[in-house]
Every structure is written in structure tokens, then in C-alpha cells.
């Protein structure tokens, strides 16, 4: 790569370069660095576009360990799916930290899905019972594939029960994924049917209110919830949060954005000191994860910039080494 050249990476490049197992290792590094305060992460900007029911999240970060600065912009538009468009669009820019030189621009819808799946893969590896075999997947949209691939990478799944309010979407998803993964995937009519049988529950919906009832959650279950990122919205009921051991990606951000925790806190049912740990503290061995086979563990992730800069940098380095992507010179065309 010559001076001034920037590497452009498409979603296909990213998928070819980064299998889920590698994404999980990148995210493990990202969360450990986060919990050790070794990534500079200013609060992300929420820029609302009310006319179009959109939110633009601007997520900067500085990763001194790899001499990288990054910024991801992800635009989430709740009416896009009704127009046949993806719910989110995103780009990531990566710069050399010692000079400020631009190094790469990548499609970040796939990057985000990969690192979000990987976060839940890591949490499932660290917190779920090793003998977990049944997964309930609530939401069969864009993120769902990556949620399933990540859990399948760390646990020997025998059956996945999928529920989406759009049954056609769930059926298509089940068909595509069972061929690819070789796991039995069954669509169910009610969230309760999936949840009541599951050892692992993953929620990946755009719902603003709980997507399952606490009474349906068995003892010993591990829950991953990725959906809500606004204080007034949630996927998980208060009753489940109260009885679970709760883990987050980054505590300050979870308390700013995660309605799943903020709503029970406002109700006086939960408090910030009840968050057991950041997942990076469990990954580094500083804090324990699951203590007993009976307890419910809950990992809430709102998604943090270190996941993007660590995974993005790793993919960029690999692409440069292996000659993937398209080089572009912004100064000379
Ligand atoms: N935590 C993170 O790091 C992170 C990263 C990316 C996306 N997300 C979030 O993940 C969620 C899913 O994103 P996506 O791109 O897959 O969206 P999507 O629109 O492609 O899919 C969402 C699916 O949820 C379904 N759904 C909505 N309400 C439901 C309900 N009550 N019960 C069952 N299904 C329901 C919809 O029918 C749809 O199929 C969004 O809320 C997004 O903000 C989180």
C-alpha cells in the first residue's frame, strides 16, 4: 500500500476475510481493552432525524495498542424495512494514529453485524451452561444470522426455535440457515414456545417493549439481548433482569442507553451496582461469570466503538496483507 492510498472494503470482502471464530477473538480483545480503559471512547453522538424516524450514531475511538483512530457512522431508520430497505446503513473510517493518515474505509453494516454476533458468541461462551443445546432466537432480521452463527460457534446446538412477528421472514431465515449450518431450525408461532424450551435466548428485534415473559424463562438459561439502544425501549422484562446475574459490554454506556436496565432502575427494581461485570472483566478472568447451573445470566449489549475499531483494524491488516479490496488515492484519483 503506497502513501496516500486508502483501502476500500466491501461487505463481501469483510465476510470473506473474517470467519465468526476470528470475529469472536477480535471482540474478546476489544472488550478486555475496554474494561482496562485502554481504548479511548468518547460518548457516541445520537443525531436524530425525526422527519424520517432515523437516528444516526457517530462512534469515534482511539486504539493506542494498534496505533489506530476510527469512526463509525451507523444510521438506523425504523421505517426502512417497510420500504424494502435495510434497517441500518453504516460506514467505518480507519486512520493511522501516529500521522492521522487515512488507511481504510469499509462497509460497516456487515462489520456491525459480525462484531455484534461475536459479542454474544463471547458472552455465550463465558456465561451459558456448556451443555446448552437449544436456542431461542427472537427476531429473524439482518442481525439474526450473525447471532445464530456466533452461538453455534461456541455451543453444540441441536435445535434452534425462531420467532419473528413477521412469520414469512422467520420461515425464509430458517430455510437459509438450516442448509448453511446443518442445525435443525424450527419456526414457532409464539415467543413463549421458543423461550420455554431454550437453554440460550437471543433477542435481535426492533421491538420497544419486552419480547418474552419472564414466567417462560427456565432456570439456568443464558440470555443475550442486542435490540434496544434507547433509554425508553427494551426487549427484556424487568422480572428477568431482577432475577438474573447481569453483564454488560460497557457499564457507563449501558446506563446511558440500555432501556432493558434503565427502565427497571427507574421502577426502583434494579440498581447500577447490581450489574455484576463488564464482559471484558469476565473474559480477562478478573471477575467470575456464571456461579451455579441454576441461575439465569443476562448479557446486554448496546454495542461499543472498541468492537468496531479492533475488528475493523484486524480486517484491514489482513486485507492489506492478502491483497483484498480496492486501493483509492484521494489526492490523485
Ligand atoms: N447491540 C448492538 O451492538 C447492535 C448492533 C446492531 C443492531 N442492533 C439492534 O438490533 C436490532 C435488530 O436489527 P436488524 O438490523 O436485525 O433489524 P431488522 O429490521 O432487519 O430485523 C428486526 C426484526 O425484528 C422483528 N421484530 C420486531 N418486533 C418484534 C417482536 N416484538 N417480536 C418478534 N420479532 C419482532 C421484525 O419483524 C424484524 O424481522 C435493532 O434494534 C438494532 O438497533 C444492535
Image (cartoon, rainbow, N blue to C red):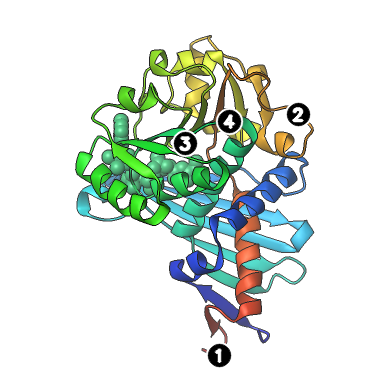
Horizontal relation, residue 61 to residue 18: left or right = right
Q: Which residue is mark 3?
A: 229
Residue 84, picture quadrant:
bottom left
Q: Secondary structure at mark 2?
A: loop
Q: Earlier in the sequence, mark 1 or mark 4?
A: 4
Dot 1 or dot 2: first in sequence order is 2
- Up the image or down, 3 lies above or below 78; here it is below
Residue denoted by label 2: 287
Earlier in the chain: of badge 3 and badge 1, it is 3
Q: Residue at x 36, y 51 (%)?
A: 177
Pick out the residue farthest to the top: 268
On whether ligand 1 comes within 8 Å of the CB at mark 2, the answer is no
Q: Quadrant of the N terminus?
A: bottom right
In what element is the residue under mark 1? loop
Provide residue 209's location: percent of width, then percent of height. 35, 25
User: Mark 3 or mark 1, which is nearer to you?
Assistant: 3
**Marks 1 & 4, CB-CB < 8 Å contact:** no
* 180 relative position to 321: left or right: left
**Residue ID for mark 4:** 128
Q: Identify the disc placed on residue 332.
A: 1
Q: CA distance from mark 3 to mark 1?
A: 41 Å
Return the x and y of residue 304 as percentages of the image width and height.
59, 45
How far is mark 2 from mark 4, CA to CA? Answer: 15 Å
Label 1, label 2: how far apart the Cα atoms are: 51 Å
Q: Is residue 154 above or below residue 259?
A: below
Q: Is residue 54 visible?
A: no
Amino acid at each position: 500500500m503506497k502513501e496516500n492510498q486508502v483501502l476500500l472494503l466491501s461487505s463481501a470482502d469483510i465476510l470473506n476475510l473474517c470467519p465468526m471464530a476470528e470475529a469472536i477473538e477480535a471482540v474478546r480483545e476489544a472488550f478486555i481493552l475496554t474494561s482496562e480503559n485502554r481504548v479511548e471512547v468518547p460518548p457516541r453522538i445520537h443525531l436524530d432525524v425525526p422527519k424520517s424516524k432515523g437516528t444516526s450514531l457517530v462512534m469515534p475511538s482511539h486504539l493506542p495498542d494498534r496505533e489506530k483512530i476510527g469512526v463509525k457512522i451507523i444510521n438506523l431508520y425504523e421505517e426502512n424495512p417497510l420500504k424494502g430497505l435495510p434497517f441500518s446503513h453504516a460506514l467505518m473510517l480507519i486512520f493511522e494514529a501516529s500521522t492521522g493518515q487515512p488507511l481504510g474505509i469499509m462497509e460497516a453494516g456487515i462489520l456491525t453485524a459480525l462484531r455484534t454476533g461475536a459479542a454474544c458468541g463471547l458472552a455465550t461462551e463465558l456465561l451459558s451452561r456448556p451443555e446448552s443445546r437449544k436456542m431461542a432466537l427472537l427476531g429473524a432480521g439482518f442481525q439474526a444470522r450473525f447471532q445464530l452463527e456466533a452461538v453455534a460457534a461456541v455451543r453444540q446446538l441441536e435445535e434452534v426455535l425462531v420467532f419473528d412477528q413477521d412469520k414469512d421472514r422467520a420461515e425464509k431465515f430458517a430455510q437459509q440457515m438450516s442448509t448453511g449450518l446443518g442445525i435443525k431450525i424450527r419456526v414457532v408461532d409464539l415467543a413463549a414456545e421458543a423461550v420455554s424450551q431454550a437453554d440460550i435466548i437471543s433477542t435481535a428485534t426492533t421491538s420497544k417493549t419486552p419480547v418474552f415473559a419472564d414466567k417462560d424463562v427456565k432456570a439456568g438459561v443464558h440470555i443475550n439481548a442486542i435490540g434496544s439502544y434507547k433509554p425508553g425501549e427494551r426487549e427484556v422484562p424487568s422480572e428477568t433482569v431482577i432475577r438474573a446475574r447481569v453483564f454488560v459490554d460497557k457499564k457507563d454506556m449501558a446506563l446511558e442507553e440500555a432501556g432493558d436496565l434503565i427502565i427497571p432502575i427507574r421502577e426502583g427494581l434494579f440498581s447500577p451496582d447490581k450489574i455484576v461485570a463488564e464482559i471484558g472483566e469476565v473474559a480477562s478472568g478478573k471477575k467470575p461469570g456464571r456461579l451455579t447451573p441454576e441461575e439465569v445470566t443476562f448479557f446486554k449489549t448496546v454495542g461499543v466503538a472498541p468492537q468496531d475499531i479492533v475488528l475493523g483494524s484486524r480486517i484491514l491488516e489482513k486485507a492489506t496483507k492478502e491483497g483484498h479490496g480496492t486501493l483509492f488515492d484521494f489526492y490523485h484519483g
